[in-house]
Amino acid sequence: MELFFNQFFNGIGSGVVYASVALALVIIYRTTGVLNFAQGEMALFSTFITWWFTDQGLGIVPAILLSILVSMVGGAVIERLLIRPVESDKSPLNVVIVTLGLFLAFNALAQLIFIKPGAEALQMPNLFPSGNISSSIGIRKSTIGYAAILVVECVLLWLLLQKTKVGLKLRAVASNPESSKLVGINTGVMLMTGWGLAAGIGALAGSLAAMRGTGFDTSLMQQVLVYAFAAAALGGFDSPLGAVVGGLIVGVAESLTVQYGHYIGLDGIELVVPFVLILVVLLVKPNGLFGRNIVERV
Amino acid sequence: MSLLELRGVSGGYGQVNVLHSLDLEAQEGEVAVILGANGAGKTTTLRAICGMLDKVDGEVFFDGSEITKMSTQAIARAGIAHVPQGRGTFGDLSVDENLRLGAISRSDGGVGADLDRSYEMFPRLGERRFQAAGSMSGGEQQMLAIARALMSRPRLLLLDEPSLGLAPLITRDLFQQLGRINAEEGLTMVVVEQNASLALDIAHHGFVLETGTMVVTGSAESLAADESVRNAYLGF
Amino acid sequence: MTAQGESSVEAPVEGPGLMTRVPWLRVVVGLVFAVVAITLPFNNTPDVNQTFSQVLYLAIAAMGLNLLTGFNGQVSVGHGAFYGVGAFTSALLVVNHGWYLEATIPVSIVITAVLGIVVGFPALRVKGLYLALITLGLAVLFPRVTAKFVEGPGGVALLQPTRAQVQSLFPDILENDQYQYFVCLVAMVLLFWVASNLMRSRMGRAMIAVRDQEVAASTVGIDVARVKVASFALSAAYAGVAGSLSVLVTRVADASNPLIYFQLSIEFLIAMVIGGAATITGPFLGAALLVAIRKRFEDTEALAPALLGFALIAVVFVLPDGIVGAYRRLVARLRSRRSSGPSDPRPEVARSNSTGPDLAGTELAGPEPT
């Protein structure tokens, strides 16, 4: 039982990362209708940027904040230059291909730019002290820290979306792009904002992910992306809340599966979990746990 | 002084021209009505004005300046409010948010007061203030769409088939309200309608379209009185 | 390396091209290609031949994906899984049951086709977005699943049949690498020929119709579900063949890297897109380019994927129809410059960026789909 709780909370830790990336995916999907396959690798690149800042002597917190800023700009630029010109209702495949190209490019660029041949794995300085919160409770301090960050993230996002003009405009564009133009909203700027926001969240997620375990490399986000997709799908791809809940569920499920899978001799089965989850959800609720029914225009 | 002028406007979707060299004028303060059968190009005309077509030949003038090549959002900000066919409400946002969005491009401080006015003008909206717009009935959404358009304090209001999908009684009330707004505030309107008689009631000028060409124009009274026109084009 | 029957589908957009107007030219070109293709392995080292073989079976896999995604519009990011199934089917039969490798290919086809049907049915119910995700899931899951059932030496999901185990029906005729090359060549030519004829048939036009306007297609009597599932099965089978051939050539079935089949799926997509989606020769050209880039930058670890990533993005901007599309547009432009009046652009049937709701894919279509 104790093990269960420990593993449960462990899962929250990774769940925070999945939830964040899923959030980014959902934001982009809702505002621009694009499934951003490159989300993970963009976050990876941002993570290397964070690391680079720390390597230049910056503390971890300013490094992360700076990296978020840089990533937001980068995300907006990518939307404007690479995504928008290519978006077309008639060939949706084009955008998918560009995001896949970005997937490859960002991963490779991170490798080329930041990794010297023969060097050992890079280390991301820890944001939270190691160890458990008390000797009797097996919950890591970092897990609490991560959870706190997720809460702050969600609150800030909620405030932005619900209480600001920009947020209202973003939601308008997500709800009805044509009518948004009719009320004078510059939809292009909103799309850039959406991508910038998602990129910033990704930067945070990646930086957090890099702190877990001993060192990180260019494979950091690939598995995370898969889990994040599962989380977003679970939540319905529609709702930021769904993404967060989905992320936490996937994180916990993964953690528990790793533990119990090990017991019953099925190692490595945890990767199956997210997809089983997606399948189950799609069979029961084709729009995910929180998704609305989107009518596909004929 | 004509607030809106179309000169030789042709345009359509993709390779196909729906409109053929249209001329149209709306004087400031009046209600102009565009009539015609289904597929005549009425909606396309409004979309041409708002820069929503793939390509447009000819010129569109608003308050003396040419707006032909401007983007839809810029045209909206210039003072043209378009209530599209099907209402175009933001379905998952609340009524209140929909109205605020109408005023989103305004930088003056009068938004709050205008919100109150909207609720006064359309009490039903006030009752559903925080409800999701998409959950309301067609008539209520139409009210919302018009109220939203008014929130931007437009100089020109474009309405695309406001009667579509609405019960006759509601439609009648709606048009009476539109007529009142025009009379009291002098708001210039261009209304596209299939329900010709109702539209001509509040209009000053009428334009009849047939397959993308203007076939008859004239004052509303003369159109309504002309039996041959009524029989041939207006269905009543 | 195109068979004679294939050249005729090279007709550019603007009507009968050089090839069809001058029929004997087609024969000549076909012969030249055939001669080149046949003599190729005898003038090169085993290493180079192996590379050629890789191009060939990669082309097959890319063609498979092309059938599903390019011609039928169902986006799959997981065809690597079918490839993997094919590879492991062959490897297992060879290692555990001593089959001849050639004999395993039909089994591979059957199994992957069935799998394609199994995936194709639920795929009918989900939005394109979720389909992409589910296929992604397949590609990612597959190595994990194999790891459960396959344990090669070292306990990893890796099968490496020895030379002795990979028994061929014709052991002594040609040097191994040359023989492999010819098997791949024959397979590719055959499968491309099948694809070409398929796309010119009723079924092919139905596939395209379903891609472009599903609802309209159903109203003209096309059984949309059947077409979609069949496309899935067929494209899976192609990938399966490619997988089996990969075992023939490299003598390895490797699932130790959990992301390998995802990466392969991306490669198929790259080959398809760069070569030209919804074309017949596109997947082959794309595969050739892909392998060339990979080989060229083999040493610098990340340079090849970086270039491929850029190439992919560049292709969408500069050559949205891939190399084949660009060639066609060039030819069309040259021809229209020669002719006097404005050219009459007939609807290009099989392009993945087709413009809208004309029922171009059905019986009512004009030019042949390519």
Image: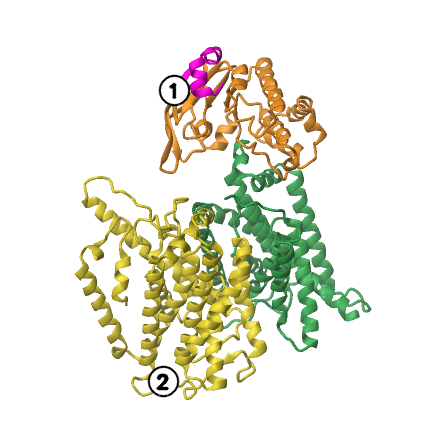
Chain colours: A green, B orange, C yellow
Magenta stretch containing residue A246, yes or no? Answer: no
Q: Which mark is residue C40?
A: none
Residue B112 figure quarter: top right
Q: Front-most of C271 and C203?
A: C203
Residue C283 figure quarter: bottom left
Q: Secondary structure at mark 1?
A: strand
Q: Front-most of C93 and A241?
A: C93
Q: Marks 2 and 1, how far apart in space?
A: 80 Å
Q: Which mark is residue B215?
A: 1
Residue B218 visible at all? no
Residue range (magenta): B215-236
Is B107 rendered above or below residue A88? above
Residue B228 figure quarter: top left
Is A96 rendered above or below residue B39? below
Q: Determine which residue is flagged by label 2.
A: C169
Position of C336 compared to B109: left or right? Answer: left
Residue A71 visible at all? yes
* Residue at screen point 63% across, 75% down: A267
User: Which of the image's four quarters has the N terminus of chain B?
Assistant: top left
Under mark 1, the amino acid is Val
Residue A257 position, x and y percent, is 68, 69
The chain carrying label 1 is B
* Residue at screen point 49% across, 59% down: A103
